[in-house]
Amino acid sequence: MNSPDDILASLLTLLEKELQKFTIDLWFSDAKAVALRQDCFIIRTSPYKKEVILARFRDVCRKVLFQIFSTEMDLVVLTDGDELPEPAPAVSAPEAMEYTFENFIVGNSNKFAHAAAYAVAMNPANSYNPLFIYGGSGLGKTHLMKAISETIRSSHPDYHILYMTSEDFTNELIEALKYKSTEEFRSKYRAVDVLLVDDIQFLAGKVQTQEEFFHTFNTLYAAHKQIVLTSDRPPKEIYTLQTRLQTRFEMGLLADIQPPDFETRVAILQKKCERFRLTLPDHLVSYIANNATANIRQLEGIVNHIHADLDLTGGEVDMNMVERAIRDLQMGSGKKPASELIIEEVCKYYNISPDRLCSKNQSQDVVLPRQVASYIMQQLTDLSLQSIGKELGGQHHTTIINSTKKIKNEMRTNPALASAVKDLMTNLSEQEDGQSF
Ligand code: ADP
Ligand code: MG
């Protein structure tokens, strides 16, 4: 699927940014693609060209391969008589090892999403495409996604699998636009067999990124490549998502994950305790399962906390220790987003620089985003009007009051603005939530 020929073609296209066209033609025109390995790309050419390529172009090829695969890849050049090198044994990061189907506890709340993910892992591009998994924070979306990716990686070592968050996608695109290298950006995705994009809700409101993602999606979909997406809400609730993207996302299978029920919470606690060889008496397990109901990340946090507490203090697990763990973790949640984050997100949304947003510039394309930022800061932070004014480049506090009023009023009559503000606020709260555990 991800044929070596395609990769060689992408490599040569991308090299055009780095080398003169005639140089590439001279040294690479009769190179043949041989194979793609976990850690290298192998080509074959004449003995003389091999020497020159390795001496002069190996580094630049590695750089370009990195752009294609987002991971260190070497260029191996063979010539007549050279043997194909043995594949390197696959090594996976320890973290990736943990996010397996085996470690995923199935209960009523997640069995549908689990079954869908498993089907896709067993039969990529031939079961559900795209697979769209949605549900609240800490319920196992990323876990399932990585389990899919690891399973396919071991059954199809030749596949090029790309896991990323939608923020990674956005940031890469911004970089590409800055350096005018959108063609490179696109080539990278053309070589992918399985694309997994986590937390797609952060595409909300990012017009240009959605545009590019639409293009990527269509290219891969048409080429019969597997796409897996996750989000904290179903596509139709990502308010500022282009309708055509929403339609694409709903084309395959939508699978939701609900918060775990009591039995699942108990099972998860037992499994996590097992990992630490931690024995918790049943009544304490039930106590935790009754008091930490929000999500699985929270349950995990509580077990980690107890484990660390035991390490420090020794002794037995008792009710005090359990209560402390629950309390500490619940206090940690509900943190407020920092004003810089709000400014950053608003700027990304409206495609202006923070410097302009926080200036005295009064043109309409800056004033509206500034008003939106001051409205959101009022809603989501504890900052005083004066501090908000300061954060926004020294606005008077009466200006902040007026801005907020104006946005409030306008949202009533302008659904596009209301959606934008809603998405921005949901994304901001979600980002903070993700970091607090
Ligand atoms: P999300 O991406 O939905 O926010 P994650 O996949 O990051 O959630 O899950 C949060 C934590 O909970 C991870 O450490 C994950 O391994 C664990 N987890 C989630 N669901 C399960 C499950 N069903 N069984 C075991 N562990 C789970
Ligand atoms: Mg996640």
Image (tube, grey):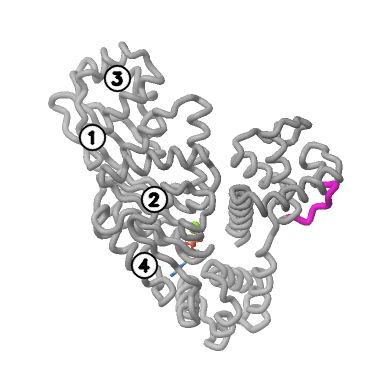
Q: Name which of mark 3 and mark 1 comes first in the sequence.
A: 1
Is label 4 in a helix, a strand or a loop? helix
User: Which residue was labeled with disc 2?
Assistant: 196
Q: CA distance from mark 2 to mark 3?
A: 34 Å
Going by the numbered disc 2, the residue's amino acid type is: Leu
Tell me if residue 385 is in the magenta stretch: yes
Q: Which residues are magenta?
A: 381-387
Going by the numbered disc 3, the residue's amino acid type is: Ile
User: How far from the left and from the top, in percent, is residue 229?
Assistant: 41, 54
Going by the numbered disc 4, the residue's amino acid type is: His
- Quarter of the picture holding the N terminus: top left
Indicate which label's residue lies in the foreground, 2 or 3.
Answer: 2
30 lies left or right of 393? left
Q: Name which of mark 3 and mark 4 comes first in the sequence.
A: 3
Position above or below: 234 against 385: below
Disc number placed over residue 114 in the picture, else none? 4
Position above or below: 140 against 26: below
Q: Nearer the viewer, residue 432 or 301?
A: 432
